[in-house]
Amino acid sequence: MGKLFGTDGIRGKANCYPITPEIALTLGKAIAHVFGASGHGERKAVIGKDTRLSGYMLEAALTSGLLSKGMDAIGVGPMPTPAVAHLTKSFNASCGIMITASHNPAEDNGIKIFSADGFKLPDSIEEQIEDFINTNAPSPAHATPDPIGKAFRIDDARGRYIEFAKASVKNQSLRGLKVVLDCANGAAYSLAPLIFRELGAEVLSYAVTPDGTNINQNCGAMHPESIAEIVRQHGADVGITLDGDADRIIFLDASGNVVNGDRILGLCAIDMFSRRRLANDTLVVTSMSNLGLHKAMADRGIRTVTTAVGDRYVIECMRENGYNLGGEQSGHIIFMDYVTTGDGIITALHVLKQMIVAGKSLRELADFMLEYPQQLKSIKVNEKKPIENVPALRDAIRDCEDALGERGRTVVRYSGTENKIRVLVEAETGAMVEQWTSHLCNVIERELCS
């Protein structure tokens, strides 16, 4: 059957391989087997989901597979990915399972798995799960009647995460702040507005009416411009946009201007550094982060460490080296002192707290760096051929790198979750960015899309 796991769990079109009820059933069995389930009460898994229609199908199949191999299942319903990671620890579960395709459209879905400590599974465990599935499909072995598990629905799960999130900022009052909150018709649609309101903020909610098919549809972190006018019209202090599973966040300032992950990482690093709370005086970023961020951090005595693109690589680096702040330009921000994965809600709370304590607007806090001109393009491809096996593209990348030298950079990489290739070009002038982005995209379209 081959490899199932990508850079962020298993993902694809719902009801098409590998996101089918048959695979989900076998995956449930594999998880129970690998985590040593042996009957009701011995091992349990927390299962959450976002608001996609296909989540019902996958949840039922996963639950059946878990139970049939002796693992109990705790269903918590629609819940942000970071909340599932937290609840896995809170319920002392063996693992957590999140059914989501994050920022992808509604027709997609996926499955992320967390270990008992709330972190995403290491490659070695994913390989064991895949081995079981490949060995037992298409006729998976069933458990004997004795070790069958039991399914539960936990009513107070949402409350546990709400209190946890508020405690991360010591229940800092947000009174006086007006917030436009875009929940992407996703997993945080009912939970996120409650958190900000309970802390005293005036909240104008947007995209909080999921119907199973409108998640991420012209809303959320992938479309922050959708609430820019609302922010301006209502005189809000800040706009907050989450993605479908709320592990990613993009802000807007009071004028409706987008404030991306680089600026949020930088302003948080500066604040933590000033309070001697930034572990090893280090911020962890990916190769997509703007050169301006690196320069601004260096000017303030903060070291930056760069990883490959993907929050899992950021987290791995943070865990291995004891760092406590890292993330991506795309809006995955990890506060390792509190969470084990990107958490849009907790990131928002920490930024709003800074605004209150410092008495500054988001624009003022974020105005610490000069961004280099940068352009990011995503192009659908027919197949993900290794770049080194596409001579024209390989040569074009080399020519771009030679032309930019130390005055810029380029990153060309395939998406880990979609059939796309991403092109990032950054340089001292917009003209150079436009020139080389256009050239690289033309080569890609000719070599990989025709």
Image: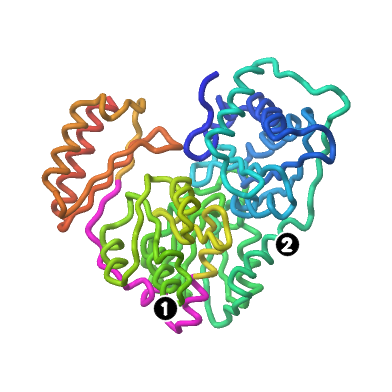
Q: Is residue 91 visible?
A: yes
- In terms of secondary structure, where does tag 1 sit? loop
Identify the image's colour scheme: rainbow, by chain, secondary structure or one colour: rainbow
- In terms of secondary structure, where does tag 2 sit? helix
Could you tell me which quadrant the N terminus lies in? top right
x, y (%) of residue 15? 59, 28
221 w.r.t. 204: above or below: above
x, y (%) of residue 91? 74, 52
Residue sitting at the far left: 403
User: Residue beneath label 2, please?
Assistant: 159
Residue 375 lies in the magenta stretch? yes
* Res. 260 image quadrant: bottom left
Residue 361, numbered circle:
1
Q: Residues within 10 Å of mark 1 (few under 14, many from 20)?
A: some
**As rendered, which of 260 and 5 lies closer to the eye?**
5
**As rendered, which of 448 and 114 lies closer to the eye?**
114
- Highlighted range, magenta: 351-376
x, y (%) of residue 357? 49, 82
Q: Please indicate whether residue 162 sits to the left or right of residue 314 in the image.
A: right
**As rendered, which of 292 and 123 lies closer to the eye?**
123
